Amino acid sequence: MRIKINPTRMQLLRLRRRVELARRGHKLLKDKLDGLVQRFFGIKNDFLALHKKLEPRLSVIFLKAIASSALSQPEAQTGRAAATVEVSHRSIMGVRIPSYRLDIEGKPSYNELTATSETGEAVNAFSEILPELVQLASLSRALRLIATQIIETRRRVNALEYILIPELERNLKFIRMKLSELERGTRVVLLKLEG
């Protein structure tokens, strides 16, 4: 990325300001990147702990549900509970992270005469675990959003560090060399005029 510049003192001052601004921006983005990575690992640990806690419980629930559907008649489940998910947002280092909260109204019902005991156990166990599943989904979404922001911020940091700042510094060096060359040429002319 070659920037066309005129070797003047005004351009030298502008480039110095741009280099300083780029360095400050680089430092801020680097700090943001470090903060995002720390938050990512904190959320990842929470996600993995909750996943580890829920996985065996879900396996048992699904086995009971499969056994229930195989042994009971299709009309065994008669009622459903109404569930709503409320979404609120919080900001982590400038990233809007959704947070989900589950509100369940009522309780799923089933016909106890035609349903098996596995049906009741599966329905009750799933009702108990559902808020934690919503929390797991919230943590999963947060991980994806923060990971996307980490990638984007890392690209910006690298662009500043390896492309923009070195190019600006090369241009500064070029202007300084041109200005010192012009100054030496002016001195030579002045010495010839005096002599």
Image (tube, rainbow, N blue to C red):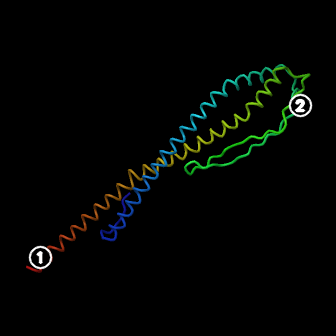
Residue 167, by quadrant, is bottom left
Q: Secondary structure at mark 2?
A: loop
Instruction: Depth check: give the residue in front, 130 or 77.
Output: 130
Q: Residue 194: give x, y in percent of width and height.
A: 10, 80
Amino acid on which the number 2 mark rests in the picture? Thr
**Residue positioned 49% across, 49% down in the render:** 32
Residue position marked by numbered label 1 in the rendering:
191
For residue 85, above or below residue 48:
below
Amino acid on which the number 1 mark rests in the picture? Leu
- How far is mark 1 from mark 2, CA to CA? 106 Å
Q: Residue 129: give x, y in percent of width and height.
A: 73, 31
Instruction: Depth check: give the residue in front, 61 or 185.
Output: 61
Q: Which disc is residue 78 wearing?
A: 2
Neighbour tally class for label 2: few under 14, some 14-19, many 20 plus, Cα within 10 Å: few
Q: Which disc is residue 161 wearing?
A: none
Which quarter of the image is occupied by the N terminus? bottom left
